[in-house]
Amino acid sequence: MTGTFHVETAASPDDWATRYLAELATGRQLSAHTVAAYRRDLAELATLADGADWTRLTHFDIRRFAAKLHAGGQSARSIARKLSGWRGFFDWLARHTTLAANPVDGVRAPKRPKTLPKALAVDDAVQLMEANTRGHAEPFELCNRAMFELLYSSGLRVSELAGLDVAWQDPRAGGQASLGWLDPQAGEVVVTGKGNKMRRVPVGGPAREALAAWLAVRPAARDGSAALFLSARDTRITPRVVQGRLKQHALRAGTPVHVHPHVLRHSFASHLLQSSGDLRAVQELLGHASITSTQVYTALDFQHLAAVYDKAHPRAKMK
């Protein structure tokens, strides 16, 4: 076991760092890779402190160091990790010196920027939907086409899509109550979203046509369910299978970005907002409990408009 020592006289930062890292390696038996990461973080702290006595560093010094890292372009995630490493070091230092308080306590990393959802350009979305729609198609392809059209047409989550039945199932008939179902007469689907909140979503013309073509050849489900979409084994499809099929379809269609079901949901929301500007309607269609969740698409829409402006406006670029 590593013995405890108390530093009565000032030691150099290198001495403290060496002792701390040795305890991490031998006492806590951390991996060499992890210890090396701590070593780099302490070296950066030493650079920022610029020769100052580490036992005299304050909360405000650490905040200043974090701000300097942020101004230098380091990500919020990276700064948070370094603050965590420094906090552990100063906890150790307080046990071996006269350090009154941990200067890192209460210092937070900058907020991580909220990443915008990825959406396809309108032309790319249309090309993806229209790929391989000519000529005779096997049932497998008709099923895929109906799923992909419905994802883009109605902005469904992949779990909502997989949970759809061909029609509403009455639990009084001995079956399981439907979580979602197709209502072809109304041209809608009913889905159960987050928080068990049910909503009705319109289905566009191309999606209705694709659904009708699939239902005309859909075999009976082997699992006895009324599942709308089936796997290769004729059982209810799973979200993972939908993801795999969409990925392969996008690759064959030559779509320039990686496509997964949520990309089609984002594309649905972004394209609808670009055309209508009705944020509340998009919120209802997506099933968001809070308008805050939907407002991210306004930023996405602004990015699109800004890109158009940069390309088209004669005074957009500085000469």
Image (cartoon, rainbow, N blue to C red):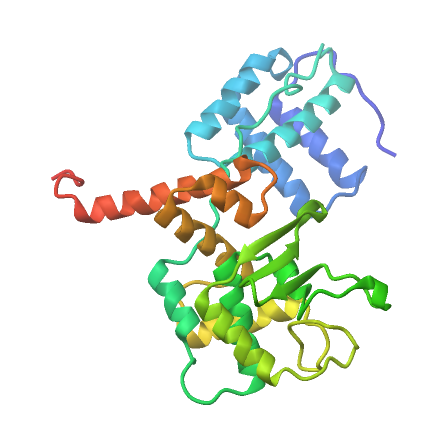
Task: Give the x, y percent position of residue 89.
Answer: 69, 27
| Residue 87 visible to an observer of this rendering | yes
Q: Which residue is drawn at 64% across and 16% down?
A: 103
Tell me: residue 25, above or below residue 86: below
Which corner quadrant of the image does residue 237 belong to?
A: bottom right
Q: In this view, does 56 lie to the left or right of 204?
A: right
- Is 318 on the left or on the right of 259, as rendered? left
Query: Is residue 115 shown to the viewer in this render?
Result: no
Residue 159 position, x and y percent, is 65, 59
Quarter of the figure that contains the N terminus: top right
- Residue at 70%, 13% in the rendered image: 101
Asked if residue 53 is positioned above or below residue 69 in the image, the reply reads: above
Quarter residue 61 falls in? top right
Who's the residue at 65% across and 18% down the image? Answer: 11
In the rendering, at what x and y percent does residue 206 appear? 44, 70
Horizontal arrangement in the rendering, residue 271 relative to residue 262 (left or right): left
Whether 265 is drawn above or below 225: the answer is above
Seen in the picture, residue 125 relative to 19 is either above or below; the reply is below
Of all residues shown, which one is farthest toward the bottom?
136
Q: The C terminus appears in which quarter of the rendering?
A: top left
Total numbered labels: 0
Residue 44 in picture, x, y percent from top left: 53, 30
Seen from the viewer's position, the closer of residues 185 and 63 is: 185
In the foreground, 277 or 35? 277
Residue sitting farthest toward the front: 185
